[in-house]
Image (cartoon, grey):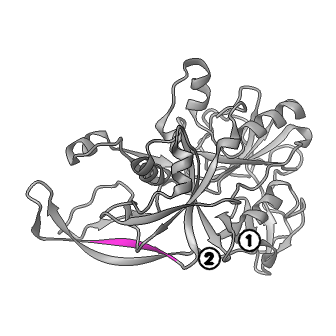
Amino acid sequence: MTGGHDRSRDRWVVLRPHDTVQVRDGRSFDAGAGGVAHSVRPWPSTVAGALAAGMGEPESVRGPVLAHCDGEQWEPYLPVPADLVVDREHDVWRMCLPEGPEDASAVCDLDRAGAPDLRPPAVPEDAEEPEPLTGLVPGAVLQDYLHGDLIAPGRAASLSALDRTADPVAAEPRIGVGLDLEARTVKGGLLYRTTHLRLDEDWAFAAELTPVGDQERRLEEGLGPLRFGGLSRMADVAPAPGLAWPEAPTSYPGGRVLVYTATPAVWERGWLPPLPEDAVLETAVVGDPLPMATASPGRDHATFKRRRALYWAVPPGSVYLLKFPNTDDAAAWAAAQHGRALSPAAYARRETGERSRLDTAGFGVVLTGVWS
């Protein structure tokens, strides 16, 4: 997306499943041979596909993220940034770039192809026995993080200040059986294990979309239950006025821009995002890759199998630190990309006008912030 997009057309919706949700990650398995069907929470393409089936394909969808309702308003909850760690005293520290020349003993496990100047981040020396921090934080806390107000450089914050919550998605193991889809019968002896996901009460999956035509009117009127995920599971869709991404800073001292991945990202060079030519990637903290499957729309199983694809995605919560030549360039780029999909298509479209389904389905949505 470019900075010229009219964001006043954007609308948020929540999807509340009637029961459990079952979405496979796309990896093959053998029923009847100790097979396990690996389940994941809904991908951006799961949400985009459900909305497109119920209202037609919108211009773009950004999400999903988890959202909680306090009875009146919805608030987004996003993964703890990957550069935060917690020590044995329950203090939270933010990883940073070491001062001075790069420490020759420091190790970075990212492939440096395409990023020769990448510097490994470091945990402040005062952090005792630090461990990665997991969970979700509300949008207001993440906004403080993006503005540099949550944790001062070289200092710690109390764990309670993050208002962190455990994952509200509970796993429910199930036993399944292989099916002959053409004959619509059960295959004898072909059992497998799978997992269904159930949201806690007052939680939902949320997404921001850009409607076209009369879709905004249809959203206001209500779409009714939509198929959501596998096994014909259903979810109610409702507008969520007031729901919003955490706000971005207005200035970026020293041309330094932090990029936080809000949704799984699929980029041409794996973990390495597409960046402007004048930006230098200083360091990155990236989580374990996620196996992710997509398929172009098709009404029959043969078409689905022919069009599906498997990718490895950058997980939400991953963090990248960029350096621009000046503050104006940094601010302009950050404002244009905040809350938008960062993908190769965003740059190719400037020349060709083409859209990418991964882009418009919500993969690679990023939020921008500052770093010191």
Residue at x 69%, y 36% (from the top left corner): 6
Given the image, on which type of amino acid does mark 1 rest? Pro
Where is residue 335? Give x, y as percent: 78, 39
Depicted 110 relative to depicted 125: above or below = above
Per the image, label 2 sits on a secondary structure element best described as loop
Q: Residue furthest top?
A: 351
- Based on the picture, tell me whether residue 121 belongs to the magenta stretch: no
- 236 horizontally vs 119: left or right: left
Depicted 269 relative to depicted 49: above or below = above
Q: 113 and 336: which one is in front?
A: 336
**Residue beneath disc 2:** 166
What is the quadrant of residue 333 in the picture? Answer: top right
- 317 horizontally vs 84: left or right: left
Residue 315 seen in the current view: no
Residues shaded magenta? 193-199
**Residue beneath disc 1:** 130
Where is residue 139? Give x, y as percent: 73, 63
> Which quarter shows the N terminus?
top right
Q: 241 and 324: which one is in front?
A: 241
Per the image, label 1 sits on a secondary structure element best described as loop
Residue at x 47%, y 37% (from the top left corner): 357
Mark 1 and mark 2: span between their CA atoms?
19 Å
- Dot 1 or dot 2, earlier in sequence: 1
